[in-house]
Image: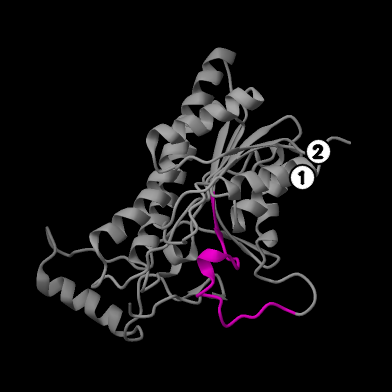
């Protein structure tokens, strides 16, 4: 019996630790050859010297289990190094079939305290990093499709966050980047569908180096699999990367602890039409002020309760 990803090749970014590591191992278990990418900086804020060890260790682990894997230690937020990452998959495995974007850093701060470089660095790694790899993977699949005269196999799985869905007061840079990733995903899904390529995004909840503060009060159980283990997320990534998910495109899925929820696109909550040629201030005041007066004070665009799941926010004032 063949494995669902047998004969396919994948790139997983940020795969030296946490979610990326679990995803790379899962794709390899399902039969894919994997390029394990990780820049290897020790600090979750992107600080410290880059190291080849995290990516190399995971590649060794995959090969020890009988799979095929090579390490790539480039910075995906660098345009040229992202190009090199895609080319590494083509050189090593004859092509690229699956791209999983996971690399990221945190530079948490309240919006009124955030420095310019704290904003720029998070946007650069998360959002630009997702774009860079997507851009070169998309060009690869488009060229293959033109050469083949029809659709080819391509899968993109991007990593968003519930910080985008519910807001996160101490992470305006991170929440904005994750929202941008959803926009990038849906745009990519529309652009590449005719080439046979799908693009989807996940909002994972897992205990990793990135979330150690958020889940500090949720201790790991003495027995059994931790509900916040990255291994709960990896199977969904494996599914979205597989032929079985051919009809799943432009979707956002929340996943953690044995649960997968499909998010709907934003819908209209209420509509008001002017009785004149154009709205006036007084008319808008008469329509909108009573509408919002019925809501609890301080309620934001996205409620903290997302899909029936309590979102723990990292909102300390720093």
Residue 135 lies left or right of residue 148; in this view the side is left
Rendered image: mark on residue 29: 1
Which secondary structure, mark 2? Answer: loop
Which residue was labeled with disc 2?
Answer: 3
Residue 316 lies left or right of residue 148; in this view the side is left
Rendered image: mark on residue 148: none
Q: What whole-number distance in Å separates the C-alpha atoms at marks 2 and 1?
A: 8 Å
Residue at horizontal 52 percent and vertical 16 percent from the top: 146
- Badges 2 and 1: C-beta atoms under 8 Å apart? yes
| Type of colouring | one colour
Q: Nearer the viewer, residue 43 or 275?
A: 43
Q: Which residues are magenta?
A: 201-221
Residue 163 lies left or right of residue 36; in this view the side is left
Q: In terms of sequence position, does the residue under pointer 2 or pointer 1 come before the other?
A: 2
Residue at horizontal 60 percent and vertical 66 percent from the top: 206
Which secondary structure, mark 1? Answer: helix
Q: Residues within 10 Å of mark 1 (few under 14, many from 20)?
A: many
State which quadrant residue 176 falls in: bottom left
């Amino acid at each position: 019996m063949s494995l669902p990803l047998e004969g396919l090749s994948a790139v997983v970014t940020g795969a030296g630790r946490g979610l990326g590591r679990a995803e790379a191992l899962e794709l390899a278990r399902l039969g894919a050859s994997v390029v394990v990418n990780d820049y290897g900086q020790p600090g979750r804020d992107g600080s410290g010297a880059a190291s080849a060890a995290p990516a190399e260790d995971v590649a060794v682990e995959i090969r020890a289990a009988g799979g095929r894997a090579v390490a790539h230690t480039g910075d995906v937020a660098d345009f040229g190094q992202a190009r090199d990452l895609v080319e590494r998959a083509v050189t090593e495995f004859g092509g690229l079939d699956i791209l999983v974007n996971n690399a990221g850093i945190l530079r948490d701060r309240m919006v009124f305290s955030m420095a310019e470089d704290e904003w720029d660095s998070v946007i650069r790694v998360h959002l630009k990093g997702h774009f860079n790899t997507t851009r070169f993977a998309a060009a690869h699949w488009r060229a293959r499709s033109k050469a083949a005269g029809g659709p080819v196999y391509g899968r993109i799985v991007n990593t968003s966050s519930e910080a985008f869905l519910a807001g996160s007061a101490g992470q305006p840079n991170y929440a904005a980047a994750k929202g941008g990733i959803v926009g990038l995903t849906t745009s990519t899904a529309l652009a590449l569908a005719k080439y046979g390529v799908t693009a989807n995004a996940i909002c994972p909840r897992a205990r990793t180096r990135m979330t150690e503060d958020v889940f500090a009060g949720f201790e790991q159980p003495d027995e059994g699999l931790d509900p916040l283990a990255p291994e709960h997320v990896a199977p969904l990534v494996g599914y979205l990367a597989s032929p079985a998910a051919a009809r799943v495109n432009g979707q956002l899925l929340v996943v953690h602890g044995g649960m997968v929820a499909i998010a709907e696109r934003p819908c209209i909550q209420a509509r008001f039409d002017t009785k004149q040629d154009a709205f006036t201030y007084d008319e808008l005041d008469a329509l909108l002020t009573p509408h919002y007066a019925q809501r609890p004070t301080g309620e934001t665009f996205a409620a903290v309760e997302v899909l029936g799941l309590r979102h723990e926010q990292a909102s300390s004032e720093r």
